Image (cartoon, rainbow, N blue to C red):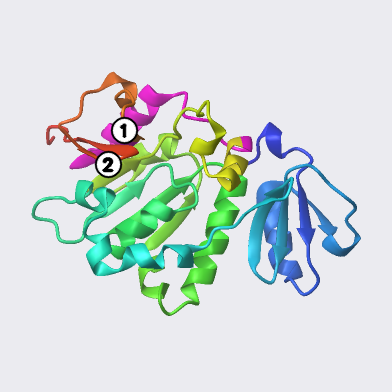
Amino acid sequence: MTNSLQDGLLLAVDGGASFEYAERVAASTGARMVAADGLEVYDGLMLRLGAGGLSLERGGMVLRGDFSDMLPRLRPANLARELLVRAAKVKGVAAPVVADATAGLGQDSLLLAAAGCTVVMYESDAVIAVLLRDALERAAGDGRLASIVARMTLVEGDSISALPHLAPAPDVVYLDPMFPERTKSAAVKKKFQLLHHLERPCSNQEELLRAALAVHPRKVVVKRPVKGPYLADVKPSSSLSGKAVRYDCIVPPRP
């Protein structure tokens, strides 16, 4: 699972990092392993494996999956106010099974798992997938997060082809097609600009929504810009809006 942007990608391995782990990351991403100590100045996109985990770096920007940053949002009082958690609720189902078809770095899946959901995450980009897996493995060793990430499963692959074959059907399919790039760079956290080198905003919206509906969930939840158009021009059954984002809920007829 590589794309043209990953051709020539480096994996800089710091001293003390697990060589076996580095080999697995290199095999997954197609990256070329080099010793970080001997690395000359490099301006390209690269992965770095060190004591703090795996990171994506370029031009002084560093992006690392770190679920501990989200601990304040996981407190029960705060979690209950999360729009996504409210949008994903299913009447009569205490602990819904959610398929997150566009996992990214897994922050939204973490919120859902903290709320009691069982979450299957799909990530098609190999580099983002190894960053997410690294974050999951580190969180599994953190007593504050271990029981939450135990409810999260990562599938490294394309959800559009995988979703229709998922059985039993999930209660909820969650879609977060990346927002179109903003014209003002300040609108995107600087470090997350690194992700735009790997994945572009969703261009196959109709296919993504069709795959989500094909698995016959009770609900499809779609994350959109607060004033953005509906995904694939499909009007939702209901919406929950915040200051920056909106969650559109599509409730398909039951088969």
Residue 163: image x %, image y %? 36, 40
- Three-letter residue code for mark 2: Gly
Left or right? Give the position of 5 relative to 114. right
Q: How would you rate the neighbour count of disc 1 (Cα within 10 Å): few for under 14, some for 14-19, many for 20 or more?
A: some
Label whose residue precedes the other's in the sequence (2 or 1): 1
Left or right? Give the position of 208 relative to 32. left
Q: Quadrant of the C terminus?
A: top left
Left or right? Give the position of 112 relative to 70. left
The residue drawn where x is 53% and y is 37% is 186
Provide the secondary structure element on which disc 1 rests: loop
Most distant residue in the bottom direction:
143
Q: How would you rate the neighbour count of disc 2 (Cα within 10 Å): few for under 14, some for 14-19, many for 20 or more?
A: few
- Please say if the residues under marks 2 and 1 sit with CB atoms less than 8 Å apart: yes
The residue drawn where x is 90% and y is 52% is 40
Q: Is residue 15 visible?
A: yes
- Residue 78 lies, with reference to residue 51, above or below; the image says above
- Residue 42 lies, with reference to residue 132, above or below; the image says above
The residue drawn where x is 31% and y is 33% is 226
Residue linked to disc 2 = 242
- Residue 224 lies, with reference to residue 65, above or below; the image says above
Residue 45: image x %, image y %? 73, 44
Spatial CA distance of label 2 from label 1 is 7 Å
- Residue 152 lies, with reference to residue 194, above or below; the image says below
- The residue range painted magenta reads 197-223
Residue 98 included in the magenta stretch of the image: no
The numbered disc on residue 226 is: 1
Residue 83: image x %, image y %? 25, 48
